[in-house]
Structures are given as C-alpha cells and as structure tokens.
Image (cartoon, rainbow, N blue to C red):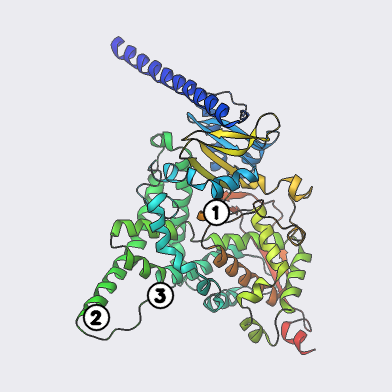
Amino acid sequence: MIIVDNLWSLAVACGLLATFLNILWGRFKEYQGRKAHGCGVIPSYPQWDRIFGLDLALSQMKALRGDTFIPWLAAMHEGQPSTFKVRFLGKRQIYTTETENLKAMTAINWKDFGISPLRRSTKAFHPFADKGVNTVDGDDWVFSRFLIKPFFNRDVYTNTDRIRPYVDSLLSLLPPDGETFNIQPLLQRWFLDLTTDFILGEPMGALNHPAKAKITWAMLDVLRGSRQRMQVVRIIKWFNWDWWLKAVYEVHAFVDTHITATYKEIETRKARIAAGEKVGPEREDLLWYMASHDSDYEDLRSQLALLLVPNNDTTSIFISNALWHLARHPDAWARCREEVLTSVQGSEDEAVGQLSFSTLRGMKFLNACLDETLRLNPNNVTQVRICMNDTTLPRGGGKDGQYPIFVRKGDMVQVTKTVQQRNREYWGEDADDFRPERFLELKPFWEFVPFSGGPRRCPAQMMVMTEAAYMLARLVMRYERIDSRDANPYQAIMRIGPSNKTGVLVALHKAREGNSIDERKST
C-alpha cells in the first residue's frame, strides 16, 4: 500500500511539474514572439486557479447547465479589457470583442485559424459525427463545402414559391384571435418540414402530425451534449453521457433510413440507364446530390448529420426570437405591417404571390427587425477558432489594447459576439434595447457579421434571411397586432444558438374590419 501511495504521489508530482514547465515554455515562446512582432502583453483574467483553470471550467459548466451562459459571458467581460487571456483546463484561451481581431481571424489570416483541432481531433462529437463542413479544415473542408455549396446558390435562395405551401399550412393552424399560445413549437415543426424537404427530398409532415417531430428532441439533445462535450473535452470521461449517446443513436437511425434508400435509388437508376431503359429526372434535393458524389456510407452519414442536426431549427429559433421582441414593441410590428402592405398589390392571395426575393429585400424596416434580432440574439454566440500556427492579431496588446497580440499555435481564440454586438461605443447607449431603426442609421460591416465572414461564411445566409423575411411578412400581412403574454425576461437556453426558455407566448389579432389587406387595397 505504501508503494502504491508513493507511486501515486510521484505521478501527481510529475504531472504538476510537466504542467509548470509547459507554462514556463509557453511564456518564453510568447516573450520571443512579442519581441519579434512588436506585440503588447495580453492582459490576464483574474483567476484563483492560474495553472489548470478549474475555476473557470466549473463556473462555465454551471452556467451552461443552469441556462445562464449568456449572462455568464457578459459578467466575465464586464470591467475587463476588450481582449484578455484565461487558463481553461490547463490550456490558454484568448477572449476578445475586437472587430479587427474577428476580421483577421476569419478573413485576412483565416488559414492560420481552424476548427478541426477543437471539433474533430478531440473526438468530442464521436460517435455522432466525424467529417463535415463545420468540423474540418484544409482539403477536407473544400470537399465538404463542395458537397453543399451548389444548393445555396441564387436560384435556390431566391425561390419563395418553395416556402409558400409550408407557411400556408402553419397559418391554418394558428388559434383564434386573442388566444394565448406558444408559437415557437409551431415554427419548429414548420421549419422541420421545410428543411427536410430541401435536404432529404421529402417533408416530414410534422406540422400536421406533431408526433413526427419527436426526432427534433433527439437532435436538440445531440446539440446540447455536443456543446457541453466541447467545453469539457479534456475531462470528458468524468461525465455520464448515456443520455447523449441515446439521442445520437436515434438521429443515426433516422438519417440511415434516408441514406440507404437514396443509395438504393441511385443504383437502381444507374442499372436502368445501363439497360437502356428510360428514367425520369433526378431528384433535386441535397441528399441526392451528396450521395451522388460521396460513396462512403460513414462519411456521408457524418456529412449529412452535421448539416441536418445543427440546422434543424436555426431559422425557427431566429423567427421565434424576432417575434419575442416584436410582441413587446407594437410600434415596430405596426411599421413592419405598413411596409409590407405598401409593397404589394391586390387581394391577399395576389399579394402573397408578390412576395418575391427582391420585394422582401426591399423591405428595409422588416429586414432591420431581423438584423436587430440577430444582433441581440446571435445564432453564433461565440466565434471560436484554434490557432494553427504562431501568428498575430491586430488588437488587444498593451495597457491601452492598441498593440497587436502574439497568438501561439494551439491557443483558442474566442470572439464573444453577444458582447461585441452590444458595444455601446459603436451601437450607442441603448445597445441592450431592441431598436431596429439603428440599422437604418448605421451601416455596420465587421461590427455585425451574424453568419461569420471570410471564406467560411455560412453559405445558407441568404436562404435563412429569405425564409425569415417571408414568414414575418406573411404574419404581419394577416395580423394587425401581436401581444406578448409572458411577463418574464428573456432567458436563453443554448442550442445551436439562444432560445427563450419559456418559448414565445403571444396572442395574435387579425386586421379589424376596414383594415384588412383586401379592404385597404380596394379603397
């Protein structure tokens, strides 16, 4: 027993010594890098554990599990410089809200920063997925991008006709005027139908058959667990992940059904062509295209899962957040409605047919409401990259933060968008308030990139904005007023982005007699 105890003590002592030497070596390399590139010192965040950073890891996990992650981030930045470094589970991380650093990391020096060491190499997503457009770098990323990019071209995202039948179905399910209800689940089922039609080639039918939306809950558990696993990847074995694995296997079973059927259909089609038989046109969905260019079953499952699961309700959450704000700002709803009604002509049915991409893009205030929603509730709360090579970022060094900083290979850099996009120096003293008019006054560029920027900008940006604008236009066209029926403040639960914990409790009111679109257009 004494020998075992001594060996254990020796192992702990060696581990501590190795960590201490690693920190010293890192500081020496940083000193050399600063001198060579004229960089300033990065301020340190006050921590009681400056070696392992367990204090920060524990408080972050508590915030994630207690649905207080966004306030936790805000409190962390409060009173700190715009850029600072922390220790987190033995690694150095750099937090920043500097616009120039975001620009350098995602555009100018984007090849110096990657995501694979964070999301793929760590096996944090295993066995859910491996390769995908949002987990890999280099040639793997080029191939993953190739698999999806053609389906986010202009011909696709400008087609509002594909959205119309699903919005028609949702509108038919809305309750009578003045009745309190939670619109968020309806929006989730709407988007599930819309996105499965686009990605898998057939809608799930969740709007009219809510039980079919059960897979959504498994997808949400996969997202929640994946986020938590990334945060604690160095101590991932300390936690019980049975609940996450159960959700992973449910999602795999769902995806496998569609992949197997698609591969079989492709082979049957090839055989019929080889036999000289006539065949109809190919399917036009994303899965068909991906399966036609990727014959590796496991790889296709990974690529598809990493596309379908993180995006299964991004647009519905986005619209839900917009409605949460608009229900508390009746003047903004009325202005949106006026803008829509003056942009179309004829009866309601005729007016709906005029909601083209260009018409929607021309609705400046409506789009300002959507932008203001993304500013306050960004889908990507943080923009995170791992430094792939020793390099620099342009801001954050020195006492005034105006010097560049030296970033070491292996450092994690995180731009906190929920703080950056509420910076009072740029957005004004009312930066925490919902005021869409600011987007009619300001012309932000790198101060506001809700879909990221540079080569890795989200290819679905225009599709998401078109879908959200179309849904909002249809709602304000039919309903004169929206009332909030929830007095609670917004409390974000983290999925792929923030979603209000209590949903969106509202009551809708159709236009009064003499104020409907048909009657307004006839006068």
* Residue 234 is at least partly visible in this image: yes
Nearest to viewer (mark 3 / mark 2) = 2
- The residue that disc 2 covers is 273
- For the point 60% across and 48% down, the residue is 103
Q: Is residue 337 above or below residue 92?
A: below
Q: Is residue 45 above or below residue 338?
A: above
Tag 3 secondary structure: loop
Residue type (three-letter) at the residue carrying disc 3: Glu
In this rendering, would 123 be left or right of 44?
left
Q: What residue occupies the far top of the structure in this picture?
A: 2
| Marks 1/3: CA–CA distance | 28 Å
Q: What residue occupies the far left of the structure in this picture?
A: 275
Tag 1 secondary structure: helix
- The residue that disc 3 covers is 284
- The residue that disc 1 covers is 454
Residue type (three-letter) at the residue carrying disc 1: Gly
Nearest to viewer (mark 1 / mark 2) = 1
Quick one: label 2, few (<14), some, or many (20+) residues within 10 Å?
A: few
Task: Say whether disc 3 or disc 2 marks the residue closer to the N-terminus.
Answer: 2
Task: Say whether disc 1 or disc 3 marks the residue closer to the N-terminus.
Answer: 3
Q: Is residue 447 above or below residue 336?
A: above
